[in-house]
Image: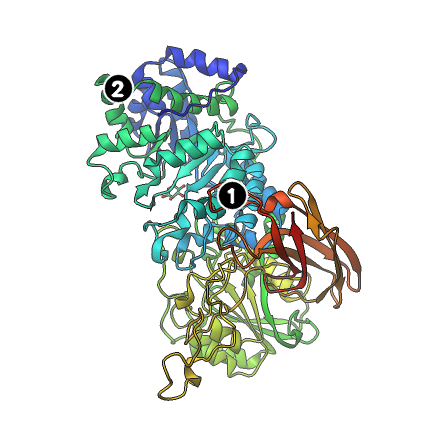
Amino acid sequence: MLFACKKQAGPIERKVEKLLAKMSLQEKVGQMNQLNGHKAGENLYEKIRRGGVGSILNAEDPVQLNKIQKIAVEETRLGIPLIFARDVIHGYKTIFPIPLGQAASFNPDIVEKGARVAAIEASEAGIRWTFAPMMDISRDARWGRIAESFGEDSYLTERLAVAMVNGFQGEKLSDPTSIAACAKHFIGYGAAEGGRDYNSTHIADRQLRNVYMLPFEAAVKSGCASIMTSFSDNDGIPASGNEYLLRQVLRNEWKFDGITVSDWESVKEMINHGFCQDAKEAAFKAVKAGLDMEMVSSCYNEHLVELIETGKISEELINEPVRNILRLKFRLGLFERPYLDTASVKKTYSKAHLQLAQRTAEESFVLLKNENNILPLSISKIRKLAVIGPMADAPHDQLGTWSFDGDKQYTQTPLSALKGMYDDAGFQILYAPGVAYSRDKSKSLFAQALAVAKQADAIVVFVGEEAILSGEAHSLADLNLQGAQSDLINELEKANKPLISVVMAGRPLTIYNEIQLSDAVLYAWHPGTMGGPAIANMLFGKTVPSGKLPVTFPKITGQIPIYYNHNHTGRPPTRNETLIDDIPLEAKQSSLGCSSYYLDAAFDPLFPFGYGLSYTSFKYSDLSLSSDVLGRSDTLEVNFSLTNTGNYDAKETAQLYTSDLFASIARPVKELQVFEKIFLKTGETRKIRLRLPIQQLAFWDINMNKSVEPGKFRLSVGGSSEDGLIAFFNVK
Ligand code: GLC
């Protein structure tokens, strides 16, 4: 059944219909193809001349791109312009922190600003369509693409995804600096079994609705121009052939009028899935499911015309995708302005862009430990600072995954920033890599590092992951630091100097031992072009950490999947269970108690979702609710006082969680509903009011209806997902 949602006929719709009526079948099918422009050549030019291409991805050279566009506009029968696409995931040239790091900022405004900068820089290069924001809920740090996600929580992901869509798309898509956003990967890709990329997912429809679809629905409602189907099969159905997702949910329920694009060759890969016999069946199932554009593979180009001419599918099944594609091209203003002005002044790498990238990095860092307030360092006390580790001066790796276009020569590393920080003659930076790169197993550089450490007043060791170790297809079965990095920290600790570890990685790592050995630990993710000055400023207190974890950190990999908004189970852990070393000999079968925990790892994570320290401290007090009985259409006002009780002006992200205590299905132990990042001067107290519309408590219930069920709710307000100030309220 074809679920078409007819658009009200505005000027663009009239243009779409008028152009569609002129198009041949081959020209229509041509629009449904996106080809790889990386190696554009005569073959590609010929395909374009035949009207066989609708979009090009990875055309990197603006001059080349205009050349290709000229063929499409001036050498084809109807002159339909191409859309040029690229993965502009966390910056184009100026690279921002990886999305997981941006999520730690809990700052939608700065995320939106960063996407705006990326759009300005990418559109200057002729790119008008990015394949971002990636909004896969990620609960498994073995999955390398957690780096591209906003973490494990649907609400945080939703807020940041919408911010990124708005940043990319600007006020209106026809603005020359606007680029079409792409909500990906639809859907559930982050639940790949075992954290092994491209693996199957088994997500029940209710869980899809209550967890994975929420950010996509919000992105669609915010006007996101496109959606990308995931490589993965959910419950046996590959997303690129899933009619329920692409028609029933996207078109029929959400009234999405943008375009759906497959992932790279994911249409053809439905053969590998065993879901299709051959390319013809892949074309048939994808177009029947409602997939508008095929990325790189050519099942559509090779078989759609035949499928129509032999009556296997109706031409209307092609018309709808072509309408969606033409509509986006009109909205982008491509018919009026198909060419890039290659002579205009470039804003790429402007001072303003670099400053924003630095500020975003600063807001993304999470202070995990700060024993005896060893941080911030003081220049008066630290005359010699040992800077050690493979990530101290790693301009390429600091940019993180999906940073194709970032030029590493612009990267400012921690070493370069620290060296340039003070011109105080007595202040010295002593550098030694310790290991040559994150996977380096050799200890041949240890002696030099230890010699440097012995001379210094304090040690900052930069460890983590090379950029290639996270991102697509880069799953890890063990999240311990690679190579000899842990051994290096073990040795450095013996120098008996203040030891600060800075971790640059694309995912949570199991750094239990490093946490024990270090006096302070700052998690910097992959911080991008300006990560160095951002870290240097923070180490010396010019800025104060304000990041909060967007993802739970496991103690050991075996605890995964581990996330804060899990269900209670019938036997919730008491958190003081007997651990393996304390079990008496010949212990009786059920003597240890029967609850949901690990004998060798207990239940608790290393650090919980929403956790992050500051150089100052905050006190939450005087919690009060506007009412403790509310109707479904009411808004609960949660009032409390927040005090900066320490010695630094700083920002705190206050978080409000609710627990639906009894419902028609088992509900998560708690869910983030509201957060607000608040700046307080030292000693300042402010009355804070957080608003929670009761409608926000709706979920897909036992009958698969989205509803707010009456009942008792528990509420917690604090600086992490661990319990803070508690109150209760009832929904009538
Ligand atoms: C990749 C990724 C997708 C990306 C696309 C184009 O395989 O899965 O996220 O946008 O191909 O590069």
**Residue bearing the label numbered 2:** 308
Tell me which image quadrant ligand 1 sits in.
Answer: top left
Dot 1 or dot 2: first in sequence order is 1
Q: Is residue 579 left or right of residue 647?
A: left
At a point 39% along the width and 56% down the height, the residue shown is 143
**Disc 2 marks which amino acid?**
Ile
Q: CA–CA distance between discs 1 and 2?
A: 36 Å
Q: Residue at x 32, y 41 (%)?
A: 238
Circle 2 SS class: helix
Q: Helix or strand or loop: what does disc 1 sit on? A: helix
Question: Dividing the picture into quarters, in which one does residue 291 lie?
Answer: top left
- Position of the N terminus, as image quadrant, is top left
Q: Nearer the viewer, residue 451 or 378?
A: 378
Question: Could you tell whether 441 is left or right of 617 in the image?
Answer: left
Q: Quadrant of residue 592?
A: bottom left
Residue under label 1, please give it: 215
Marks 1/2 in contact by CB < 8 Å: the verdict is: no
Q: Is residue 65 visible?
A: yes
212 versus 391 height, above or below: above
Residue nearest the observer in this picture, 436 or 110: 110
x, y percent for residue 289: 34, 31
As displayed, is residue 437 above or below residue 221?
below
Q: For the residue carrying disc 1, how many other residues have a C-alpha within 10 Å: few (<14), some (14-19), or many (20+)?
A: many
What kind of residue is marked 1? Pro
Label number found at residue 509: none
